[in-house]
Amino acid sequence: MQAKKANEATSVYLVGSGIAGLASAVYLIEDAGVRPENITLLEQYDITGGALDGAGDPEHGFVVRGGRMHEAKYRCYWDLLSRIPSLENPDVSVTEETFEFNQRFVSHAQARLLKDGKKMDVSSYGLGLKDQALMLELLFLPEAALGRKRIEDWFTQEFFDTIYWYIFTTMFAFQKWSSLAEMRRYMKRFMHLVAGLNHLGGVMRTKYNQYDSVVRPLLRWLRERGVKLALGTRVTDIDFNLAADKKTASLIRIVRDGRDEEIVLGADDYVFITNGSITESTDNGAWDRAPRLLGEDQAGAWQLWKRIAKKDPTFGNPGVFCDDIELQKWYSFTATLHDSTFHDYMEDFSGNVDGTGGLVTLTDSNWLMSIVIARQPHFPNQPKEVKIFWGYGLYVDRIGNHVKKKMSDCSGEELLEELWYHLKVQDLMRPVVEAGKVNCIPTAMPYIDSLFMPREPGDRPEVIPHDATNFAFLGQFAEVPDDCVFTVEYSVRCAQTAVYGLFDCGKKPLPVYVGANSPKALIEATRAISH
Ligand SMILES: Cc1cc2nc3c(=O)[nH]c(=O)nc-3n(C[C@H](O)[C@H](O)[C@H](O)COP(=O)(O)OP(=O)(O)OC[C@H]3O[C@@H](n4cnc5c(N)ncnc54)[C@H](O)[C@@H]3O)c2cc1C
């Protein structure tokens, strides 16, 4: 369909206030010329930001479901944030703030993998000739030829015991049963980082957690311009007029304050839909309580996509991604300490000052636990004497090595007991725990790896489905060729694709940076995997 120019009456409804929705609002205003007061973000929760969370205080403990690794070639993301003033210093953009921060705190992990509490030698990826050859072969196959193959369908069994796999699986949260096609995209896209991956070289972080460093500045920018924010508003269904040659969204059904309402879409109205979400049905536990594993009943995003998908074959296959929680779930945890013993120990042990080490993975942990000590403070309201760190485990159904429970059944206290055991700091940490100076909040994320489920072309809808006149799909379950799905970059790229595709504004999405297109990166990566 032909892109149209926005006019005074153009209104856009954005389903979801994750980075995809927020970015869309910015591009609609800045590049498409849509009036800010005609843009409405419809968000089911009482908070914006979607996956980009960060909450809490020293008394009750802080929580982040995750922390984002970025890199310099996130072209769309840095473009977006270069337009947004930093919260703390409005004279610089969030992009400038973040690049400056990363010049001061350069990522170079010196304790990336541990075994028996000791640092492992990660100088070689340890790949056998057969797996090296399979990696190269994979790069040269077209994505469509891979169908719904899993990673474990491709490589040898030995591959999953290599340094390479431990680094790859824990950095990006791929499982053996994840999509091979998705892994191939990561290998190509991030080829320029492969030689330094064993030390997390090239990884960039924001100054604070992403709610404070990214979402809050975006929100302030949008609010100042008059964008409408409808929190606590769940979109339950969307009606479409579906003709053979054109598809038009005509009505949005919402539930607000327990009441059903409808938004009728006129000739100048658009809707962008974040379909699916990896953080749906998240539940937090506590120091003395494990989180609950919730499911689709609490997942407005999945319910909506399932309803819409029934209406047209080009709207994708949500069930492929969300119907098997057992293959998708993993749990994270956030520890808050009113004491610096652990952070001092880790700095001494790893050789990394906080904020420069990134993931530390316990390779002999049955849960495959990793932790990250971000630069302190990680929250603007975090006092100097309070320290936090984040961790996660990929295999939550396995019994711990020390705590004889599944990770999914553990309270915050039990998770930390298991961690102290692996790091051999039980004696060091006992007095700190007994003095009540530690809190830890575990978080269950049933859908977190849904985006890596084996899928084939058509399972994700195009950002702008063929013949769509006034709607687009956004986020991690819309198809963006070549880019990597578990990234903020992907979601911002969707926003650019949707805005520049539906509105005639003379702009195109920035091209995806594909590391494998650089001969230098290819040579260095080949050398690194064969070393
Ligand atoms: C633990 C974790 C670690 C991560 N690590 C990294 C990393 O290292 N690097 C990186 O680049 N990225 C990382 N990511 C991924 C990144 O955070 C996400 O890709 C990105 O934030 C997704 O943004 P989104 O807007 O597409 O979707 P979401 O953030 O999922 O937002 C969707 C929003 O839409 C709302 N919504 C959906 N359906 C409805 C409905 N029917 N009605 C109303 N509202 C609705 C939801 O409530 C939600 O707020 C990580 C994510 C997590 C959770």
Image (cartoon, rainbow, N blue to C red):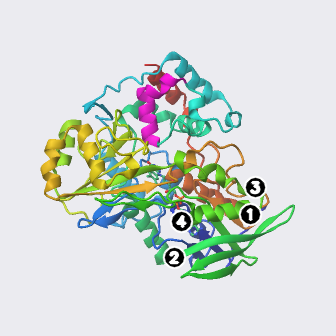
Dot placed on the residue nearer the N-terminal end, 2 or 4: 2
Dot placed on the residue nearer the N-terminal end, 2 or 1: 1
Q: Amino acid at mark 3?
A: Thr
The residue that mark 2 highlights is 232
Q: Nearer the viewer, mark 2 or mark 4?
A: 4
Element on which disc 1 rests: loop
Element on which disc 4 rests: helix
Dot placed on the residue nearer the N-terminal end, 3 or 4: 4
* Mark seen at residue 3: 1
Percent of width and height locating residue 91: 36, 65
Q: Nearer the viewer, mark 1 or mark 3?
A: 3
Q: Amino acid at mark 4?
A: Gln
The extreme front residue here reads 404
Q: CA distance from mark 1 to mark 3?
A: 19 Å
* Mark seen at residue 149: none
Asked if one can make out residue 27 in the rendered structure from this viewpoint, the answer is no
Ligand 1 within 8 Å of disc 3? The answer is no
- Between residue 261 and residue 289, name the one nearer to us: 289
Percent of width and height locating residue 205: 37, 50
- Between residue 469 and residue 285, name the one nearer to us: 285
- Residue drawn 67% across the image and 34% down it: 146
